[in-house]
Amino acid sequence: MSNLLATKLRRPALSPKRVHRPQLIQRLNDGLDSGRQMTLVSAPAGFGKTTCISDWINALDLPVAWLSLDPADDDPGRFFTYLIAVLQQVDANVGREIEQVLRAGQLPPGDVISTTLLNDLLVWENRCLLILDDFQVIQDHFILQILEQLVTNLPPALHLVLLTREDPSLPLARLRANNQLTEIRATDLRFTDREADQFLNELLGLSLSRLDIAVLEDRTEGWIVGLQLAGLSLRGRTDSSGFIANLSGSHRFILSYLTEEVLNRQPEDIQRFLLQTSILDRLNGDLCDAVTARNDSHSLLQQLLNANLFLIPLDDEGHWYRYHQLFADLLRDRHTTLLKDQTAELHRCASQWYVQAGMVSEAIEHALAATDYATAVHLIEDHAMDMLMQWHIKTVNGWMQAIPADWCLHSPRANLAFAWLHMMRGAYDQAAPYLQRLHALFSDPRTSEETTDPALTAKWLAIQSMLLNAQGKPTESVALGSRALEIAPEGDGRVRSLIYLGLANAYQQLDDYARAVDAFQMIIRYGQAATNSVSELLGSSGLALLAIQHGQLHFAYDLAAQGIERVERSGSLPPISTAVYGELGVIHYQWHQLEQAHHYFRRAIQVSALSGYSDAELFYGVILSRLFQIEGNLEAAARELQKAVDLMQVVAPAAVREEVVSQQVRIYLAQNRLAAAEALLTGHGFSFQEPFSFPDLNPGPQDARSVAMLYVSALRILLHRARVRRELANLKPGIELADQLIAGALQHHYLLFALEVLLVRAQLHAALGDEQASLADCAQAVELAEPEGFLSVFVEEGPSIAAILAALLKHDRLGAVQRTHVEKILAAFSGSQLPDAEHREPSVPPRPTAQAGSGMALIEPLTDRELDVLRLMVEGLKYEEIAGRLFISVNTVRSHVKVIYGKLEVKNRTQAIERARRLQLL
Amino acid sequence: MDQPYWYEIRVEGHLAEQWSAWFDGLAIQTGPDDETTLSGWIADQSALLGVLTRIHNLNLILISVCRSSPE
């Protein structure tokens, strides 16, 4: 799906067999050189519009944004999403704000879109071409109105090229009058005798006389598709002149006539192949095999391509093709006449193939075309999770409308699908009607046999367990999730990974790291087993995020990097990959590899632009803001954060809220706006008036960590007041609060958070003049940070932490800390003031080795279950035997072993045993 | 306004009868000259535009469009 999507945003492949048309190119260049703002190429199908323009731009040394439009793009939300995406290939900053709103499922007012886009485009200094191909599909009034405003005020740097079969409803007359329009029309595009000669004799390999060519040219009126069909009909004929003379004497519609000629001259099996595959919008070898029950479609397609049979490659790799629009129309016409009784079956085969290929949208479209509603609903429901990741609600609604209403009302599957789609986005109010219907359907045993289907019942339980998570009831959620696991069929990986997703979330809320890791590992494993890369990536991404919070940067890096590598190799780009790119960005940020971090955040934003997944955008707003702040660009940091704050009005995922507030406080304090910072926290129950009071540090378990962030923000305010106003009175209670936060964070292994609070406490001590305590905090932070290479958490704190670190070196208060580690952190401080000073190739910092870590206790202690497994490993038992002893599955043993290796920082059993002995774990 | 009317659409060239399904079931008659007439009930203006677009997409040359009473 996504690689097909990418073909929309990219200029078409240039065929090596094409007629060069210097006169046309000259006219196009003249228009561009004389500063005209727009080129209109208007002619019916088959006049070589696309070929001509791609040939032209191929020789131009200008950036080009090429958007190939489909009928489905005649929808403002979709059109502007693509338009912005394609413009961002030239300049990533264009239309960012509109994009955010669009992504939240809203359409900004028309004049806002046009003004914002124009403002973004006005700053362009270098010329760029925006090409909209197949523009005739755009009929929507709203889109045309905005384009009219754009066309009327086109910025000098942008040259707009429209390729269309009919003149667009835009003020062309005004552009013509102002000499701002280059027009290429059918009469300009038709082949001259010379071009027809080159085309037929050189490219199609015929040897026609000059006279024959002239007759053909006359009869087809230079229409390229007509000439091509004529050329194909002439292949292998001995009396070409006779055929041509006959053709010129006939009044028959030349396209229909020639198509029949061409088809009839193909061997029967090729004819059948063409007619059967005409139901497909896009073709590839495997798909055609499935539809036609052949096994040689790949070479057949290659053969059609070589024979110029109107097959257009959609990518450079030769995977996907489509038929030329006209040829496809003609084939479909013949198909309806000859193969009508096969049509539904062919669509069903196509649908099945797309299911196998994991391209659900296409599978659903074909199932609907086959009027196979049961399959369509089944697919929508089964793939709801993936479809959410490629959130096109209008498309989904369109599908649901194609299904008779009765089906939707009484189908547990359809309701599960919709409930799930809305819930995954956090839109619980929109999910409510579907949930109510589900309650009714599942509590009334008469309604349908489906409600007794264990897979569906399990899914219903899984959905309810997620509801409980959202309500902050993780214990109850675990109970339902466990019941769902008992019911769900062993082999149904899709349902089981859904259940594990709920469990993973619940265990996270319960601070049960090991079980949450287990649950994510199960999702990954089921995804791998089903070769469902989206599901696998969802698991990897959740696990990587968890690992980052717990300070296991290398483990997280491996997960994310492997996930991305697989995605990039597969050629498709599921929107969930945006989260994984973001995680790579965060890891590089923590390693203080800021260039790399920028790169991955840009990539994450790019990917999410295509998907409409706005929670991610909010999250990156915060982290980008921190990135700019650490680089010393406070203005950009404030700007990015403002975007996140604005977005929070539209979508408000609960977990990110405190992240936003905490970064806002940092920025305000950096801007010396103490009152604004205090006001933010006052809303959360903090009071900075005398007597100064904090709310009780006794939050519910489910959001302990995010609420704790607010306390750190309050501590930062105390620190600021101590520094700026010399108010020292409240520092002592502040330090006590920090003690509690650090103890809590270390207990639950939130390493990153523990580091941050340690460094804040070091500064609080320093403000009170307690240098010894301050040095000790810093030393502890260095010791904890070193194995996984955390650097930015120090640099973020600025010069005061640099001073303490320098003092550590100077007074030789290093204790267990190695001098080189402190020096490395200090080097990062100087690096961040000069971000571009040196351009080192960033690399993954050395991971903790057995030697390096051997002297230290584990950051992440083993759980009791992991210790059980480890003991049996020491006894030399095989996984199967361990599984038998502990009454767990072999897979669970494997996942424990993986976690054990990770925690012990080893690669194999021998190392694990050795390390465990040295640490006296056994 | 949006009610079915009988239309006659003339295009250049001879179009075979098999194209009828393509044009919403309009009857296809080849005339004495180098012409074809498509005729039949067309539901409303949108349907009419659809037929005209299909004519254009096949690069047929349009001669005339007439609304008349069926005889």
Image (cartoon, coloured by chain):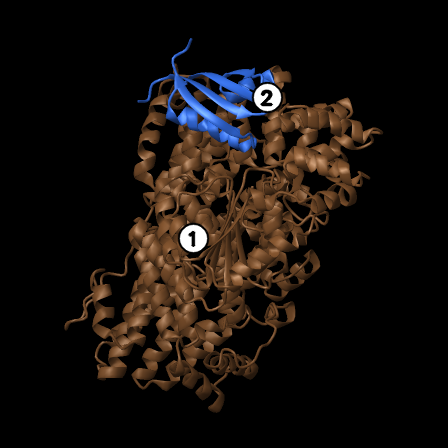
Pinpoint residue B58: horizontal percent, then vertical percent: 56, 30
Q: Please check whether the numbered discs 2 and 1 fall on a single chain.
A: no
Q: Which residue is mark 2?
A: B15
Is residue A469 visible to us here?
yes
Q: In the figure, the blue chain has which letter?
A: B
Closer to the camera, A619 or A917?
Answer: A619
Disc 2, SS: loop
Amino acid at pointer 1: Arg
The tag on residue A176 is 1
Image location of residue A357, percent across then percent down: 62, 36
Left or right: where does residue A657 sit relative to residue A158?
A: left
Q: Is residue A824 left or right of residue A14?
A: left
Image quarter (top left, top right, bottom left or bottom right) of the N terminus of chain A: top right
Q: Quadrant of the C terminus of chain A?
A: bottom right
- Local SS, label 1: helix
Q: Position of residue A244 (x, y in %)?
A: 75, 30
Residue occupying the point 62% across, 47% down: A51
Figure chain in brown: A
Q: Amino acid at mark 2?
A: Leu
From the viewer's perspective, tell me whether residue A394 is left or right of residue A713. Answer: right
In this rendering, the answer to whether A856 lies above or below A8 is below
Whether residue A552 is situated above or below residue A83 in the rendered picture: below
